[in-house]
Image (cartoon, rainbow, N blue to C red):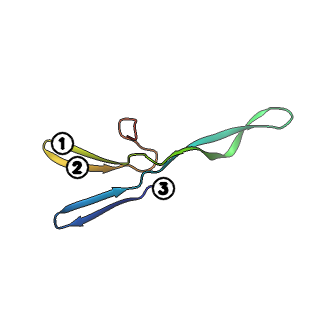
């Protein structure tokens, strides 16, 4: 879950975002015990496989002299990177 906050004040807009992310692996098949026969699961199982406390989710951009900010959430990144 990503937390991103934007606060508008007379001098501008303040933005903040958390920095923790978790990677998941989705399991869609399993093997039957004893026979090793593979079958498809009725519902996929998502397992966490890793995490980081230092991901960057808040990005500043300048386009034609104007400044912008972007917050990413969920399975997202900017240019395939979190930093």
Instruction: Answer with mark 2 or mark 3, whichever residue precedes in sequence.
Output: 3
Q: Earlier in the sequence, mark 1 or mark 2?
A: 1
**Image quarter of residue 13:** bottom left
Label 1: which secondary element: strand
Which percent across, then down, holds residue 56? 38, 46
Question: Where does label 1 land, which residue?
Answer: 63
| Position of the C terminus by quadrant | top left
In the picture provided, is 23 more to the left or to the right than 76? right
Residue 17: x and y in percent read 37, 55
Callout 1–callout 2 Cβ contact below 8 Å: yes
21 or 28: nearer the eye? Answer: 21
Residue 72 in sight here = yes
Residue at image x 17%, y 67%?
Answer: 10
Residue 23 seen in the figure: no
Classify mark 2: residues with Cα within 10 Å, few (<14), some (14-19) or many (20+): few
- Residue linked to disc 2: 68
Instruction: Determine the residue positioned at 19% across, 48% down.
Output: 67
Instruction: Please tell me whether residue 37 is drawn above or below residue 18 in the rendered image.
Output: above
Label 1 to label 2: alpha-carbon separation: 8 Å
Position of 42 compared to 8: left or right? right
Give x and y (percent) for residue 52: 49, 45
Disc 3 from disc 1: Cα separation: 29 Å
Crowding around mark 1 (Cα neighbors within 10 Å: few <14, some 14 to 19, many 20+) is few
Task: Label 2, secondary structure: give it.
Answer: strand
Q: Is residue 58 above or below residue 27?
A: below
**Which tag, 3 or 1, sits closer to the chain's start?**
3
Residue 60 shown left or right of residue 51 in the figure: left
- 40 and 11: which is toward the camera: 11
Q: Which residue is mark 3?
A: 1
The residue positioned farthest toward the right in the image shown:
34
Residue furthest left as drawn: 65
């Amino acid at each position: 879950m990503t937390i991103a906050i934007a606060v508008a004040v007379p001098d501008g807009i303040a933005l903040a975002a958390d920095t923790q992310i978790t990677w998941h692996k989705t399991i869609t098949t399993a093997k039957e015990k004893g026979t090793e026969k593979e079958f498809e699961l009725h519902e996929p199982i998502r397992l966490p496989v890793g995490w980081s406390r230092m991901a960057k989710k808040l990005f500043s951009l300048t386009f034609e002299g104007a400044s912008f900010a972007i917050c990413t959430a969920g399975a997202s990144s900017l240019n395939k990177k979190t930093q």
